[in-house]
């Protein structure tokens, strides 16, 4: 029988160079969840920082693993598939938190499946799991200008830091992202989408 645990993975790049960058929204949200639920993270096979916790939500106890892959974004799937395989967690009980340039800053979209949308972390997870049937909490970071040299600008954008006005709103945005993850696990995809996707 598959595990009753959920696996929540926040995506980012390890190391001080990447702290606070747009591409590390998943890490930041995972850190907030760890703080909320007193989860201690430790090494999992050199692939991720991993911890275990229990959320008490709406009268339900939700058991979960919380992971921050340390493989760098492009190989996030190695960590997610290793943990899912080791603990026998089905794709339907995996939630991946990541930055999304197709959404304006402050927007959240909860979904399952769909394309990777150019996100290398999601592409890696799709490949490693052999499916895209897991849940995603997409945190909008907006996008760089289109046009010539767009790829270089995109790289600079996602590895760049937030504007002063965005930094003022960041804590509240991350709290909303953490709420979306909790709602998804406790009350299901449809309820999470209804609450967060239209904002």
Image: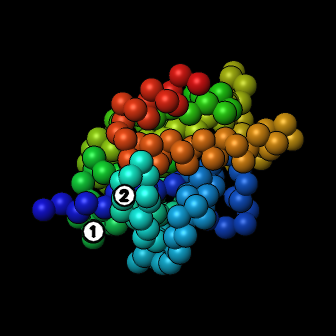
Report the residue at 47% width, 46% height from top: 181
150 to the left or right of 94: right
174 to the left or right of 17: left
The answer to whether any part of residue 114 appears in the image is no
Q: How is the image coloured?
A: rainbow
Judging from the image, what secondary structure is the residue with disc 2 in? strand
Question: Which residue is more in the foreground, 26 or 2?
Answer: 2
Dividing the image into 4 quarters, which one contains the N terminus? bottom left
Report the residue at 50% width, 41% height from top: 180
Judging from the image, what secondary structure is the residue with disc 1 in? loop
**Callout 1 crowding tier (Cα within 10 Å): few <14, some 14–19, many ≥20:** some
Give the percent coordinates (x, y) of residue 54: 41, 65
The answer to whether any part of residue 44 appears in the image is yes
Q: Residue furthest left?
A: 1
Report the residue at 72% width, 47% height from top: 171
Against 107, residue 21 (above or below) is below
Looking at the image, tell me whether mark 2 or mark 1 is earlier in sequence order: 2
**Callout 2 crowding tier (Cα within 10 Å): few <14, some 14–19, many ≥20:** some
Q: Residue 62 carries which label?
A: 2
Q: Residue 87 carries which label?
A: 1
């Amino acid at each position: 029988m598959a595990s009753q645990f959920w696996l929540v993975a926040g995506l980012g790049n390890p190391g001080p160079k990447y702290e606070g960058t747009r591409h590390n929204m998943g890490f930041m949200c995972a850190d907030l969840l760890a703080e909320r639920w007193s989860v201690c993270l430790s090494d999992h096979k050199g692939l991720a920082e991993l911890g275990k916790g229990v959320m008490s939500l709406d009268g339900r106890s939700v058991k979960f693993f919380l992971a921050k892959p340390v493989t760098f974004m492009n190989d996030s799937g190695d960590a997610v598939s290793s943990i899912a395989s080791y603990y026998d967690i089905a794709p339907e009980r995996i939630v991946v938190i990541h930055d999304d340039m197709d959404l304006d800053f402050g927007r959240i979209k909860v979904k399952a499946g769909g394309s990777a949308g150019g996100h290398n972390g999601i592409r890696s997870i799709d490949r490693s799991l052999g499916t895209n049937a897991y849940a995603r909490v997409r945190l909008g970071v907006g996008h760089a200008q289109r046009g010539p040299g767009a790829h270089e600008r995109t790289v600079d954008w996602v590895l760049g830091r937030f504007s002063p006005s965005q930094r003022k709103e960041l804590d509240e945005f991350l709290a909303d992202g953490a709420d979306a993850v909790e709602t998804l696990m406790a009350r299901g995809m449809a309820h999470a989408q209804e609450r967060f996707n239209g904002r």
